[in-house]
Amino acid sequence: MRFFLRVLPAGFGLALAATTAAPAQNAALDARIAQLAAQEESKVIAWRRDIHEHPELGNQETRTAALIAAHLKKLGLEVQTGVARTGVVGILRGGKPGPVVALRADMDGLPLTENNDLPFASKVKTTYLGQPVGVMHACGHDTHVAMLMGAAEVLSQVKADLPGTVKFIFQPAEEGSVPGTEGGAKLMVKEGVLDKPKVDAVFGVHIQAQTEVGNLSYRPGGEMASSDRFTITVHGKGSHGAYPWNSVDPVVTSAQIIMGLQTIVSREMKLTDDAAVVTVGTIHGGVRYNVIPPDVELSGTIRALNPETQKQIWASIRRIATNIAESAGATADVNIEPYVPVTINDPALTARMLPTLRAVAGTEHVREIKAVTGAEDFSFYQEKVPGVFLFVGGMRKGQDPATAADHHTAGFRIDESGLTLGVKTLATLAADYLTAPAR
């Protein structure tokens, strides 16, 4: 997915509420974490390159999972494997009793053939939905795994100073499962990953290819959109293309429905509050140029930044498709499949941890962003416990973001010098949450 991160002025919005907050607690512990994170850099880069060279699709991450599990066991953590098919969970118990914090990374690659001249570029091939294709880490999940492995090693070295428990969640299938199979964060939650021990808060990071290394980005409230798939099947009456008056043309009707759907965002949504998207991505109908088919199928995606808007769009799609079809003498079957909820950063937790982010990266390198219409299944954890999801810069210093290869493209690449900040951020968020009292 591509993230269009519009940055607000430093200190804007919720950040104002935290400008007078006390600095991150336990400066000595945080300094130790920063030192250890720097020492882990070469390991983290090596892990990332290994995973990048050997990507695996969702629910197939067996090699990646084995690498993670071996690392966590070596650190002396309690390790659970086979969670939500291929997921791995590590539990680090601190030296004193206290709350439980979870850190999450996703593991899966994408069905995409890499086009980079890197020595560790992926050459993996597979068959996806019946088509031969390459496999590539084109969204940075390899960096997420490596950074969380690094954070686990750092925190294991200071566990005596941690009053509580850290749960490391390595999640499969964030990009989705093969159609017809369940997976990802939704299945992990269903299988109890937030229980035993019960998680009090969860944090996650995502690398960002259009943001310079050394920077962290966040947004309180709705940060990333919900993502739903819709399918509209228009049933008409076929005929010879030379005699359209004998048909109820589902092609023309579908065209009118497509144009009608465009008015949902432009005329029904209060865009001064939140953005929304309704996109038709596929149209399938007919097999011959001079035959009007009896049916046409449309499919597309819906994006919204709050649940109320999401439900309003669902109702509008059903109304518009059904009524336009009826006006043409056709019928329309509308199916909406909810996929990912809105990624909502808990405002109170975001404000509480903002001093930590500023201490880790420097105030001038922590920015609040506008909401984005990309989606993330981290939202399933946030439905159950307070959570904060952040972006970590992965673009080389001085590069024009317009020239940086997009996420989910064959040329996607990351400046690995940004990974240490990710390790330090994850580890310090966990430590400060456990050691600093809520205000």
Image (cartoon, helix red, strand yellow):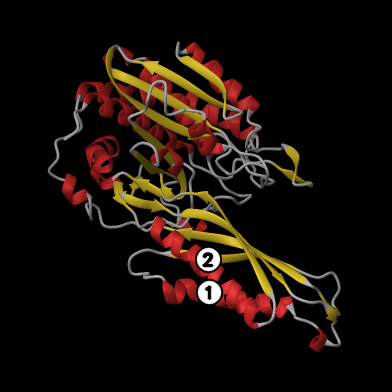
Q: Residues within 10 Å of mark 1 (few under 14, many from 20)?
A: some
Task: Give residue 119's position: percent from left, percent from top.
Answer: 64, 35
Identify the amino acid type marked 1.
Gln
Task: Give residue 70's position: percent from left, percent from top.
Answer: 55, 16
Which picture quadrant has residue 358? Answer: top left
Residue at the spot of label 2: 278
Q: Residue at x 34, y 27 (%)?
A: 101
Dot 1: what SS?
Answer: helix
Q: Is residue 311 above or below residue 93?
A: below
- Give the alpha-carbon distance from disc 2 to disc 1, as whole Å: 7 Å
Identify the amino acid type marked 2.
Val
Labels 2 and 1 touching (C-beta < 8 A): yes
Q: Is residue 156 left or right of residue 22?
A: right
Mark before the other along the chain sequence, 2 or 1: 1
Q: Is residue 198 above or below residue 130?
A: above
Which picture quadrant has residue 86? Answer: top right
Q: Nearer the viewer, residue 379 or 57?
A: 379
Residue 12 circle label: none
Q: Nearer the viewer, residue 157 or 398?
A: 157
Task: Give residue 379's position: percent from left, percent from top.
Answer: 43, 44
Quadrant for the C terminus, please: top left
Dot 2: what SS?
Answer: strand
Q: Residue at x 86, y 80 (%)?
A: 290
Residue 262 circle label: 1
Q: Nearer the viewer, residue 54 or 379?
A: 379
